Image: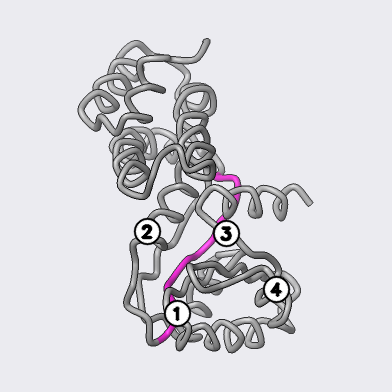
Amino acid sequence: MSQDRELFEAICRGDRDGCRERVQAAIDAGSDIVVLLNESMIPAMREMGRRFSCNEVYVPDMLLSARAMQTGLDLVEPILAAAGHRARGRVCIGTVKGDLHDIGKNLVAMMLKGAGYEVADLGVNCDVAKFESAVNDGSEVVLCSALLTTTMPYMKTVVEHFRDRSEVDVIVGGAPVSEEYAREIGAAGYGRDANEAVRVLDDLFAG
């Protein structure tokens, strides 16, 4: 099965109806859903991530594409679950305690889902206990987001909480966060944007 170009383009332009129709048509035709996901849907989100990193598209465009992707995933996920398909990894993501901003976090979460990860979206104002609960439920990586410089220090609290848990990695990101800050607090990784967050996770799970 080659790439479904119509599906690919529907996701890239944020066409939810077009995405839903193409995915449903593939299901009705008995197509291999795993191939559809890996050859058409995930590449579309990676392409949008590339464009975003190059400033060819912007946050509204990414959100539209991610929402289109989600309409397709809503159809695909029950089929994959019934077939026992394993996600690439289980992760959780949340905006840290004291911070109620969620646009960037939502974008990363949707990109990760589109890349084949099982994502527990913990929302905003997340304390250590919320991240801990997600890890106890099976999340292997904790992703922390912050938009305020005043809430960034809580990322260090999260990193230190999991410091003795070698099986858990903490990745940080957000507008005021830098790679230097990530190293300073001992985080396992830093994502400058949603596309880079996916790449960092890919590297972690590949290792």
Q: Secondary structure at mark 3?
A: loop
Q: Which residue is mark 2?
A: 106
Q: Mark 3 or mark 1, which is nearer the start of the sequence?
A: 1
The outermost residue toward the left is: 17
Q: Secondary structure at mark 4?
A: helix
Q: How would you rate the neighbour count of disc 3 (Cα within 10 Å): few for under 14, some for 14-19, many for 20 or more? A: some
Residue 41 position within the rendered picture, expressed as x and y whole percent measured from the top left? 45, 29
Q: Mark 2 or mark 1, which is nearer the start of the sequence?
A: 1
Residue 95 in magenta stretch: yes
Quadrant in the picture for residue 182: bottom right
Indicate the amino acid at tag 2. Answer: Asn
Residue 185 position within the rendered picture, expressed as x and y whole percent measured from the top left? 69, 82
Q: Which residue is mark 1?
A: 96
Nearer to us of marks 2 and 4 is: 4
Indicate the amino acid at tag 4. Answer: Glu
Q: Residue at x 68, y 65 (%)?
A: 189
Q: Mark 2 or mark 3, which is nearer the start of the sequence?
A: 2
Q: Secondary structure at mark 1?
A: loop
Indicate whether 105 appears above or below 47: below
Q: Which residues are magenta?
A: 87-97
Image disc number at residue 192: 3
**Disc 2 from disc 4: Cα separation:** 24 Å
Indicate the amino acid at tag 3. Answer: Arg
**Disc 4 from disc 3: Cα separation:** 11 Å
Residue 15 in magenta stretch: no
Residue 143 position within the rendered picture, expressed as x and y whole percent measured from the top left? 54, 67
Q: Which residue is mark 4?
A: 180
Residue 35 position within the rendered picture, expressed as x and y whole percent measured from the top left? 52, 22
